[in-house]
Image (cartoon, rainbow, N blue to C red):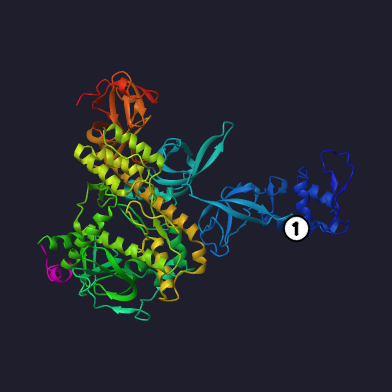
């Protein structure tokens, strides 16, 4: 290595050092990088050539060396200047590619200025004792270290797995004489101009992706269309807004489709033959896949009088989606299927989910089955898992099965009633005894279903009837999930649990204060059980304010997540719980199947050692994809409802206050379930303060009160389908309370001088 020697130079604007090793030799790559790092005054090739004494025949290989360093991303060129690529900060947000090797992870900076050259590749450290274990496709916060050499070799120690943010700039094009404007899907973002030359092939109303350019001395943001996604109005594809804005993968790579197409049907090899057991599927009438089947019969064991044998069989997805394959990587990346009113974004291709792993009537199918022995009291006495080949005896809808039990069998269910359906219902009746004794949280909140017409617009909105058939399948699936967790614990196997923590002390305090304002008592201890909440809901039903209380009880609950550590499921009041029953649409269930295969010696396609080491990171990832799916489904419903009601501006609706903040009231319409907002500045002729303990806005002077769950009449003032938002005007009067009896010092809402016609009906 050459020594750095100081040299006098009268030209103070030029380089102040001589770094050349010899007058007749090229510098090494390391010496070039060291020079650029130490000397900020070195501006380009000429300065470097002077420093290293490059002349004559050395110029050509010298230029080639610089070009090689630039192509490797180690130096970057801005205009005519060369400089060393920027170093990563000590703590950096990194993105791990979805196709990275799970056993040898690498990542790249999540944010990078292209002028700095190519993104540096970072090796992600891991190991058995790592507290945070990321996986392909994750975004992480990491502590960065680099080697001592001039060529940076970065390593990252993961600190936290982060949720990936949605795409920054997606919106609807609205054309005008000067070009167009972009209406962002996020109302918090401002509209931007799209010059005529930057529209590409976008037409009025198209949903597009854009990049933002800053122009002029005022750095005004302007948008340039980079991708036309489609026209939600004409194509009936409002769900595409959520798919693109939340970056939900929806197109399967060719490698994944190829693997799915090449998959062969499973045979009896290493399986038990259960094709004669009359398992049946019970699903929604429009279901395209059938991944669970059930059977029940009376237990003939005289030691178990009045008992039952209940069998739950689940499609054996693990037989087709094996670790390390393209199918597996894509399933992990998606995490779960996403359900929209107009489409499903599946976790697995149709060849797997709708064919090989769909338990079709009369077709032999591979399955994982659990056989559970129940007592007359519905409590499980024992269970065993089996890897089987089955043949569904019948495909029924929930309504079909319920009608048969209710005395209205059809040609298909008539012959099934005595031998199959009645034993299922008898076993379920026993299981309800155990369920009631266990006391899970009983929050029966209605969920509306949106039906679309041929153009993708809302045709009908309704609350599906909650049938006993629904509860039967739900209870049997819960029992199977518990059995899976128990078996894996007994075998000392890694488990991907479904956990639901108990409410935090802060949330319980807030709930207790709210209930106090309604004269509903709640014990002061933070050691609560699901049954305690059921008692509160019973009080609320008697008092006639169950909607208000149900909403607050729901808000007090923690969010259920996936985790390799068990801390129980509070809502179901279960000590251990794992998702086993739907591996075609949840990656967590696929992992549980693999763990059972490994633990019970069912084959060589079970959970790998590498997967076991990465369970913590996988859990964080699939919990995040689940939240993403829920958000996408909710946002799409909001947009469809806003579009449906956009033709009814000025109409009056009945609703309930579904949320209260210092900024105003959120109202959910009773008929459609659509949500909208009433700004506090438009509520009444008074100063309104937000009282958190009461979840209400209360007028300082009049004592007029609007609280959570109150029934109100509103007028629709504005609907923004792209953003999925609506603004209402309040027409109802609030309950009157004594202002002096309300706690002072609460947060003040905006001063409001409501419209004069507010109380006109």
Residue 650 visible in rendering:
no
Q: Does the stretch in magenta take in 489?
A: no
Q: Which quadrant is home to the N terminus?
A: bottom right
Q: Which quadrant is home to the C terminus?
A: top left
Residue 436's spot in the image, x, y percent? 24, 55
Q: Residue furthest top?
A: 701
Residue 451's spot in the image, x, y percent? 25, 50
Residue 559's spot in the image, x, y percent? 39, 49
Give SS at disc 1: helix
Which residue is more in the foreground, 112 or 618?
618
**Chief SS of the magenta region:** loop
Which quadrant of the figure has residue 746? top left
Q: Residue furthest left?
A: 407
Which quadrant of the figure has residue 683? top left
Q: Is residue 246 above or below residue 725?
A: below
Q: Which residues are magenta?
A: 408-421
Tell me: 526 left or right of 163.
left
Residue located beneath label 1 in the image: 65
Tell me: 66 left or right of 288.
right
Q: Is residue 504 above or below residue 319?
A: above
Label 1 crowd (10 A; few <14 / some 14-19 / many >=20):
some
Which residue is more in the foreground, 415 or 635?
415
Residue 361 visible in rendering:
yes
Residue 349's spot in the image, x, y percent? 38, 65
């Amino acid at each position: 290595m050459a020594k750095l020697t100081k040299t006098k130079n009268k030209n103070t604007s030029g380089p102040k050092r001589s770094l050349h090793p010899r007058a007749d030799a090229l510098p090494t790559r390391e010496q070039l990088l060291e020079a650029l790092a130490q000397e900020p005054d070195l501006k380009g090739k000429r300065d470097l050539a002077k420093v290293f004494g490059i002349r004559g025949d050395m110029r050509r290989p010298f230029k080639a060396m610089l070009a090689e360093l630039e192509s490797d991303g180690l130096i970057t060129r801005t205009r005519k200047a060369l400089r060393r690529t920027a170093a990563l900060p000590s703590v950096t947000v990194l993105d791990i590619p979805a196709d990275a090797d799970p056993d040898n992870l690498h990542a790249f900076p999540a944010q990078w200025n292209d002028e700095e050259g190519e993104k540096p590749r970072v090796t992600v450290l891991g190991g058995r004792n790592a507290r945070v274990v990321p996986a392909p496709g994750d975004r992480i916060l990491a502590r960065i270290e680099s080697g001592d050499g001039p060529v940076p070799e970065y390593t990252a120690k993961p600190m936290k797995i982060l949720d990936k943010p949605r795409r920054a700039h997606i919106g609807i094009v609205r054309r005008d004489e000067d070009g167009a404007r972009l209406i962002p899907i996020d109302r918090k973002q401002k509209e931007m101009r799209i010059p005529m030359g930057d529209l590409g092939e976008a037409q009025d109303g198209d949903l597009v992706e854009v990049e933002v350019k800053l122009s002029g001395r005022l750095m005004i943001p302007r948008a340039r269309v980079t991708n036309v996604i489609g026209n939600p109005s004409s194509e009936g594809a409002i769900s595409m807004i959520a798919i693109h804005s939340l970056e939900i993968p929806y197109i399967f790579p060719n490698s994944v489709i190829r693997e799915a197409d090449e998959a062969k049907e499973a045979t009896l090899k290493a399986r038990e033959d259960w094709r004669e057991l009359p398992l049946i599927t019970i699903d929604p009438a429009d279901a395209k896949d059938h991944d669970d089947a059930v059977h029940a019969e009376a237990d003939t064991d005289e030691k178990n009088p009045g008992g039952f044998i209940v069998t739950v069989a689940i499609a054996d997805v693990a037989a087709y989606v094996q670790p390390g394959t393209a199918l597996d990587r894509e399933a992990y990346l998606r995490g779960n299927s996403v359900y929209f009113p107009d489409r499903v974004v599946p976790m697995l291709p149709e060849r797997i989910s709708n064919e090989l792993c769909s338990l079709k009537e009369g077709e032999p199918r591979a399955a994982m089955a659990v056989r559970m022995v129940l007592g007359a009291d519905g409590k499980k006495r024992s269970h065993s898992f089996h890897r089987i080949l089955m043949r569904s005896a019948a495909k029924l809808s929930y309504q079909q099965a319920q009608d048969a039990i209710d005395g209205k069998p059809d040609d298909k269910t008539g012959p099934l009633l005595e031998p199959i359906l009645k034993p299922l219902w008898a076993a379920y009746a026993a299981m309800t005894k155990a369920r009631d004794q266990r006391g899970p949280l009983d929050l029966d909140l209605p969920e509306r279903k949106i039906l679309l017409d041929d153009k993708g617009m809302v045709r009908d909105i309704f609350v599906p009837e909650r049938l006993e058939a629904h509860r039967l399948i739900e209870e049997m699936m819960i029992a199977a999930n518990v059995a899976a967790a128990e078996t894996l614990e007994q075998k000392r196997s890694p488990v991907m649990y479904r956990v639901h923590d108990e409410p935090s002390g802060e949330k319980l305090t807030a709930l207790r204060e709210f209930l106090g304002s309604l004269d509903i008592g709640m014990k002061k201890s933070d050691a609560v059980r699901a049954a305690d909440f059921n008692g509160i809901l019973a009080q609320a039903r008697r008092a006639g304010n169950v909607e208000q209380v149900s909403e607050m009880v729901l808000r007090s609950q923690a969010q259920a997540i996936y985790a390799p550590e068990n801390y129980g499921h509070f809502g179901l009041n279960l000590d251990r719980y794992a998702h086993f029953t739907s591996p075609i649409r949840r990656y967590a269930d696929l992992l549980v199947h693999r763990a059972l295969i490994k633990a019970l010696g069912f084959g060589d396609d079970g959970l790998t050692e590498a997967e076991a080491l990465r369970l913590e990171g996988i859990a964080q990832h699939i919990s995040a994809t689940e939240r993403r799916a829920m958000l996408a489904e909710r946002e799409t419903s909001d947009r469809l409802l806003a579009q449906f009601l956009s033709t009814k501006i000025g109409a009056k609706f009945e609703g309930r206050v579904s949320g209260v903040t210092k900024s105003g009231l959120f109202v959910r319409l009773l008929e459609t379930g659509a949500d909208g907002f009433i700004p506090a500045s438009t509520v009444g002729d008074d100063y309104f303060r937000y009282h958190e303990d009461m979840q209400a806005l209360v007028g300082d002077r009049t004592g007029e009160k609007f609280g959570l769950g109150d029934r109100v009449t509103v007028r629709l003032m504005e609907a923004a389908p792209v953003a999925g938002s609506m603004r209402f005007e309040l027409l109802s009067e609030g309950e009157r309370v004594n202002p002096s009896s309300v706690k002072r010092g609460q947060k003040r809402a905006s001063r409001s001088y409501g419209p004069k016609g507010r109380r006109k009906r």
